[in-house]
Image (cartoon, grey):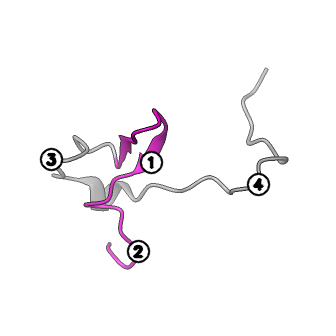
Amino acid sequence: MAHEADPTTPIPAFRINTASARNCHDCGEWGTVIDMHGHDAPCPTCQRPGRA
């Protein structure tokens, strides 16, 4: 069975800019960090809007 996005999810999935994540020490070049609730979240250092 293929994994697909759940269409009933109210918030669209975020896309990670891997070019921006390169050399980021805060997320280890993954582009995501684990937030205080244990969920994946975009890295606040390298995944800010307008950064490429």
Residue kind at label 3, given as amino acid type: His
Residue kind at label 1, given as amino acid type: Ala
Q: Closest to the observer: 45 or 19?
A: 45
| Front position among marks 3 and 4 | 4
Q: Is residue 4 magenta?
A: no
First reached walking from the N terminus: tag 1 or tag 3? 3
Which residue is tagged 4? 10
Which residue is tagged 2? 49
**At x 19% / y 47%, what residue is drawn?**
26
First reached walking from the N terminus: tag 3 or tag 4? 4
**At x 79% / y 20%, what residue is drawn?**
1
Residue kind at label 4, given as amino acid type: Pro
The image position of residue 30, as x and y in percent, is 32, 42
First reached walking from the N terminus: tag 1 or tag 2? 1
Q: Identify the residue at the far top of this view.
A: 1
Q: Which residues are magenta?
A: 31-52
- Asked if 6 appears above or below 12 in the picture, the reply is above
